[in-house]
Amino acid sequence: MTALNVLMIGAGGIGGYYAAKLAQAGHNIVLSARGEHLEALQANGLVVDYEGAVTHHDLPAFDHQALMRTYRADDFDLIVIALKSTATDSVMVELSEWLQGGSVPVLSLQNGVDNEQRIAREVGEQRVLGGLAVRIGGHITEPGKVYAEGVAQIVLGAWPVQARNDPRTGLLARLEREFTEAGIPTRVTDDIHYELWRKLVINNGVNPLSALTHLDTRTLTHHPEFGKMVYGMMAETVQASKADGVNLTERDLDEMFDLISSFNAIKTSMLVDQEKGRPLELDSISGAVLRRCQSLGIEAPYTRTVHALLQHRNVR
């Protein structure tokens, strides 16, 4: 099988780990990054610590201006966006003309349920693949170095749903096969919107509360009081899904709570961002839930309280 040519936009803990796995399997990977992280990638390569196993990868890395000068969008078989959701809008604006000059599919591996729609406004729905990273934690430990842990699965599918005779079907089957063979357990779904909302149930349950309390996921879910708050914020997310026509159930709620309760004790991405003084993905996680609850005319007291406290802390 011919190697995939993949552009990984965002080489942090999640994007860096997946890029390294694909490169190890013989695929051609290009990274985009910025600042000190980019300088370290260009000087010393990407170092990945996956649960204590450290690997080194010399991969081409560019900022976006250099990327657009060096490559056409269609030099790639797939563009993966693994950035924080807070960066989606600005990156889409920056890369818009370059992306519109090609036909390459774009896969979002980001938190939230709004990224695919934003990407589709630039490239059209027919080029968008939705995706989520499941049971993985990861972050940049220092410039050029990332840490990741967990099973690190990927679920992906045609956005917003996979239609009969969808032209993306063949690519999705290839990605499922190639990613899995590279050591990334991957599953294709015909309803990625549903899967994204299930992931948001977990993200809204633990990300904001972890940033507020500075506690890891296991401590939160097993705490006699915070565990109830996690479950409550997850339940509010299940209710919010109805605004998008994704009718999650109590079974989904219990499955997601059991999943995060049994997962490794990890620092959430929002907690890492809080510690490093970076912008939080509040708008794409708790904000997304609150907007939809408001549109439905229902209350979300757990989410609203934690969201307000974090906003207050981060604007002082």
Image (spheres, rainbow, N blue to C red):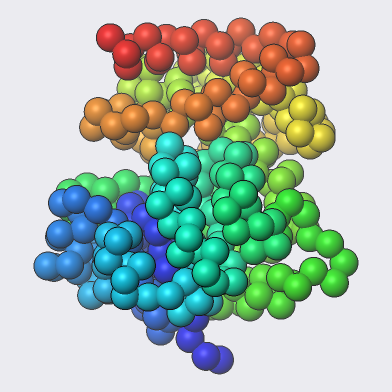
| Residue 6 visible to an observer of this rendering | no
Q: Is residue 246 above or below residue 83?
A: above
Res 167 → quadrant: bottom right
Please tell me how many numbered marks the rendered image carries. Answer: 0
x, y percentage for residue 6? 45, 73
Q: Is residue 252 above or below residue 167?
A: above
Q: Residue furthest bottom?
A: 1
Quarter of the figure with the N terminus: bottom right
x, y percentage for residue 257? 62, 31
Residue at image position (37%, 75%) is 71
| Residue 3 visible to an observer of this rendering | yes
Residue at image position (39%, 37%) is 269
Q: Could you tell whether 142 is left or right of 166 in the image?
A: left
Q: Could you tell whether 296 is left or right of 124 in the image?
A: right
x, y percentage for residue 201? 62, 32
Q: Is residue 85 above or below residue 159?
A: above
